[in-house]
Amino acid sequence: MALRIQVLPKAETAGHLAALADLRITVFRDWPYLYDGDAAYEARYLATYAESADVCIVGAFDGDRLVGVATGSPLEQHEAAFAAPLEARGMDPAEVYYCAESVLLPRYRRQGAGHAFFDQREAHARTLARRWSAFCAVQRPDDHPARPAGYRPLDGFWRARGYAPLPDAIAHFPWRDVGDTEETEKPLQFWLKELR
């Protein structure tokens, strides 16, 4: 099954937001995010993507079906909680392009979509003269009861693309885990790559 990867034209963004919400809820429900998402939150969160001129949304299609999406936008357009750890280290958020979600249905993985997702977002960040590309990865304890046997984190893939974790740069953001009744705050490690 050959995937078609393309940056979504701005005019098509709104038409894909419902599918993006479904993908986020489905993919992030699995380890390590364990996100118990809901459509109302997703609609509020994703509305910003339809409003910003500097957002990059990359779609992975099987025929006409959207099976994966990666997004990016200027860091200052995200929650203040994401900029704070970098500002504390003296970094200017206006120099950072934030690669937010990268979600792909399991049967379509290991076909190059991950690299294409980063390639397109990094290229867009360069058009905005951003110095850094960044993303956050949730931190879970190794002995977490929901951790699947044999789980391999994506650290090797990210390092091969030139990203490295920024020591002590941890954002905190709440969501409800699968099986929980309340939101709890999660630590998210910043990874950075210099684009210049």
Image (cartoon, helix red, strand yellow):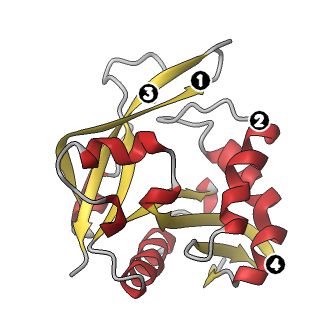
Amino acid type at circle 4 is Asp
Label located before the other in sequence (4 or 2): 2
Q: Which residue does the numbered mark 4 point to in the structure image? A: 64
| Amino acid at circle 3 | Lys
| Residue name at image x 80 percent, y 69 percent | 14
In the figure, 190 relative to 62: above or below? above
Q: Quadrant of the N terminus?
A: bottom right
Could you tell me how far apart the alpha carbons at marks 4 and 2 are, in whole angstroms? 25 Å
Whether residue 131 sits left or right of residue 19 in the image: it is left
Q: Residue at x 61, y 33 (%)?
A: 35
Whether the residues at callouts 1 and 4 have beta carbons within 8 Å, the answer is: no
User: Local crowd at mark 1 within 10 Å, few (<14), some, or many (≥20)?
Assistant: some
Q: Do callouts 4 and 3 mark residues in contact (Cβ within 8 Å)?
A: no
Q: CA distance from mark 1 to mark 4?
A: 32 Å
Going from N to C along the chain, the mark reached first, 3 or 1, is 1
Please name the residue that numbered disc 3 is placed on.
186
Q: Earlier in the sequence, mark 1 or mark 4?
A: 4
Callout 2: SS: loop
Query: How much space separates mark 4 and mark 3, taking CA atoms?
Result: 35 Å
Residue pushed farthest top? 181
Looking at numbered disc 2 in the image, what kind of residue is underneath it? Asp
On residue 52, which mark appears? none
Asked if labels 2 and 1 touch by Cβ distance under 8 angstroms, the answer is no
